[in-house]
Amino acid sequence: LFLLTSSSVKRQLIRRILIKHMQAVIREKTVNDLPPPTFTFVTAGDATAAGHGNLFSQSYTAILQDTVENAFASLGIQFVAKNYGMGQYSCGPELSLCMNEVYGLDIDVLMWDFASLQPKYEHLRRTVLWTNRAGMHPTRPILFSFDTFGERFLKIKEFDGITGTGAILMQSEALQRLKLMLPDSNAVLDPEKLPAALRYYHCDGTIEGAIQCEDPMRNFVCDLEDDMLDETEINGGAANPKICRKEKFQTKPQCMDARYQVSWHPGWKDHILKGRLLGHFLINILDDSLFELERLKSVIGSDPKHILAHLEQMEKMDKNNFKKKPPDIKSWEDGNSDVSGGVKPKTILRGQSICHTALLPSKSRLEGISTESEMVGDEHDGFDKGFNQFLMTTPEDGKLPLAFDMNDRQHCDLLEIDHKDFFLVREQDGWVDTTVPNDRELEVYKRTSPVEGIIVVCLKICPLNKCPDAYVSIDQVSRRSKLFITVDGKSVAKVQKLDGCNVLVG
């Protein structure tokens, strides 16, 4: 079920856990009020990862938290699982370039779960961008992915051999085979006696009443309709695929009108299986970590400070080794040298960036960094939400406003937390301005390399890529008729495409 690009990935994960454990041991031996060290697991992905159609607490990331937090606590470590999945988003270029601002500066494991929107035949350039940007992240997280065994995994394996940065793959094909080995509710005498998480999950060779299909609009996962069943299957028992489909989601009575309960979004049973399996894998790694700790003690002694210094030195060596290895520019360009929008590929893959983002969830928004606000909250509330675009008046201060579409929100706040908020430019508001990066962003996301002055604009993604008629494309800037942009008083003459985003050109 889990494949590693190399044995070094497991060693790096064990080392990261032991660093946290040694920090906890040292903390216990000194009298202080510092909180325990945290081990942070961040899920990055699309609507499937975000848990669309389910309660937010039913997502596999929340199940993972529930599964492993006590095991990590036994080593003095606070386990924190963050679900930062975003519907309709692929991993690049925006989310790759903005890892620090979206996912935070302290990540131990970064899960890639974009497979439903990045099918196996998509360009490998986004995998190359993702792995390079992760390698440049301040904490250089251990990479996990939920994907098929294919070109993406093999590319990361190749990358691992060159740079020492690999990944742990949770194979979707192996998981599907495992699901079909679970009790078939149509084959047992009394499916009601099965545990709730298995009851009406596997029915007649289908999982949750859905099958693979050739419909890209349904992400190639379709409900098994009644006309696909013969009469004996429909009348032959309560556990035909139809009831599996009916029992797929469990959001009532907490949320009576949950959206997105469609064939291609997994239900709560699917999430609980995935979360438990991920948790089981991490708990096994915890066991291996304790064996490695005993080995280290036999070599360098039992002093936790000495052990910690040794482990941190190994981390530093790996980070320096990565930076010495050149990025795979050929795979990034993938036969199309125009994909970089006129920017040097090495700058895109490895250069320092600061993002001014409106997306939710993002650490920069939640902590009031992008908004320069004193309002700091969690994924659900307390942060600066901006303005309802339909009720917003012209900004009196002339500043570029942060806005949201109320139709993007559901009535029940126990559902998904990802929202495609945006900075809004309207004709009736005249000129508006903003400073990027702002003072808070400069303070938090400190630069150590010279500023190159490259500005990339990534626009709001419209549902099904169909934008309203009133929407003005950023390409209009070159026509100088509907949209005008200046940077420090100098007019932007045109934009060049960077794999879907836009580079401003003077």
Image: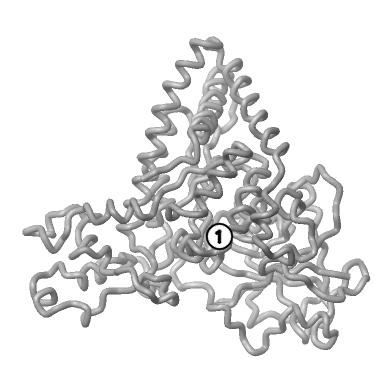
Vertical relation: 93 (above or below) 145: below
Query: Residue 499, image x and y in percent?
Result: 67, 66
Residue furthest to the left: 189
Vertical relation: 199 (above or below) 294: below
Q: Is residue 152 left or right of residue 468?
A: left
Of residues 153 and 408, which is closer to you in this image? 153
Residue furthest to the front: 335
Residue at 59% x, 69% y: name it: 420
Q: Is residue 232 left or right of residue 385?
A: left
- Mark 1 crowdedness (10 Å alpha carbons): few <14, some 14-19, many ≥20: few
Q: Which residue is mark 1?
A: 381
**Quarter occupied by the C terminus:** bottom right
> Quarter of the image holding residue 356?
bottom right
Can I make out residue 229 in this image? yes
Of residues 406 and 4, which is closer to you in this image? 4
Query: Residue 104, image x and y in percent?
Result: 62, 48
In this rendering, the count of numbered labels is 1
Can I make out residue 414 in this image? no
Query: Residue 39, image x and y in percent?
Result: 52, 38
**Quarter occupied by the N terminus:** top left
Residue at 51% x, 36% y: name it: 9
- The amino acid type, in three-letter code, at marker 1 is Asp
Query: Residue 247, image x and y in percent?
Result: 25, 67
